[in-house]
Image (cartoon, rainbow, N blue to C red):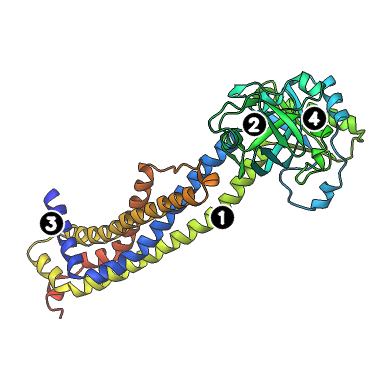
Amino acid sequence: MFFSFNENLRSAILSLKANKLRSVLTALGIVIGVTGIIVILTTIRTLNGFVEKSFSAIGANNFYIEKMPWVITDNFWRFRNRPSVTDKHFDFIVSQAKSIRYAAKCIDGNNTIKYGNKVISDILVSGTEQNDMHINNTYPEFGRFINDIDVERVRYVCVIGKGVANEFFPETDPLGRKIKIGNFDFKIVGVLPAIGQLFGQNLDNQIIIPVSTFFRSGFEGFRGGRNRRSLQLAFQAKDSKNFEEAKLEIEGLMRTARKLKPLQENNFAINEQSQLTELFDKTVGTLSLVIILIAVMSLVVGGIGIANIMLVSVTERTKEIGIRKALGAKRRTILGQFLIEAIFISMIGGVIGFLIGSAIVYAANLIGNKTQPDIFGDVKIVYDFYTLIIAVGFSGLIGLVAGYFPAAKASKLIPIEALRFE
């Protein structure tokens, strides 16, 4: 059996060598299809890993009461004209809630910061409270976080991101030094560890200050200020088991604070990680399906090409088939000969497509890291042996299906008639 397979493989290689250009053109459709599938699968898996890492910064047990939903699919102005979320809402909820571990009120906007002769524009400045450290996992690497006394006394203190620290204080300790945010001097009390990207926002270039100081300084009026003084109320459920219970409780308390009637819809949004995950899965899933279908169609076209060329090959080698059968070759031997040839052509196309697809993905990531390091710096290519198995295995299956009819036709030839063929 091994001898028969080895002989058929040698015959397939000789046939490909004898018709090099035809073999290349035959495998081209498979190459294009597999290249597309490799690029798509690798991109999807890489994006999934990147997005999962980004979403994990939000926290699975966290949810937020805000004026605007994170995902808007209909009339924007219906949400834009909602009343703002205020301190009174937060105080009422915190005084009544039983199912939450931490709660904090937050607001943010973009501003310009200065230290000496260095200036950085459009830095994210967040006003928040001590509990935000636990909710959003913003534990300082050095120093301390904003505390309740800072908020109560409206202190001009700040916690800076790693990117700000590296830019302003590359060789010195930033703790205790003062930087200017807008027109106000703030004392640095803490430095955050390197965090990376979240939805395209570099979280290493951020500054956290007391929420009371944020309002005292008038930062909410700067470009990027959140919804005209509207707060974000951040909550963390006690554990994942009572997450839905905590959401329902906070929603009910917010409705009570807003004095909404039972049949009135919420005039506020409850945002959580799952909304972004669902939107990402839906968007990427639909787009990926369309692109994969196009790639599969390319593979099908490549399979049709293989079937066509194999039919031509059977016709050209009819006399050869007749001689082999006259010398005692069995039907399954002839069938195996042409099937192996079809599969071999297809799998060569699969391997070439795999290599080209791998090179494209690697080059795209390399170029992205050089040209847009802030965006691509945290992107890691998710690539493994299974991708190769899918590529080569699928192309081999296409070759098997495409080559079966021509191979079956060759195996059924009658020796006498085949020998008379010219």
> Element at badge 3?
helix
Labels 4 and 2: the sequence-earlier one: 2
Labels 1 and 3: the sequence-earlier one: 3
Label 2 CA crowd tier, 10 Å (few <14, some 14–19, many 20+): many
- Rendered image quadrant of residue 52: top right
Pair 1/3: label in front: 1
Pair 4/1: label in front: 4
Q: Nearer the viewer, residue 412 or 33?
A: 33
For the residues labelled 1 and 3, the Cα–Cα distance comes to 45 Å
For the residues labelled 1 and 2, the Cα–Cα distance comes to 39 Å
Badge 2 amino acid: Ile
- Disc number placed over residue 287 in the picture, else none: 1
Q: Report the residue marked by disc 4.
A: 213
Labels 2 and 3: the sequence-earlier one: 3
- Rendered image quadrant of residue 350: bottom left
Badge 4 amino acid: Thr
For the residues labelled 4 and 2, the Cα–Cα distance comes to 15 Å
For the residues labelled 4 and 1, the Cα–Cα distance comes to 45 Å
Which quadrant is the C terminus positioned in? bottom left
Q: Residue furthest bottom?
A: 422
Labels 4 and 1: the sequence-earlier one: 4
For the residues labelled 4 and 3, the Cα–Cα distance comes to 83 Å
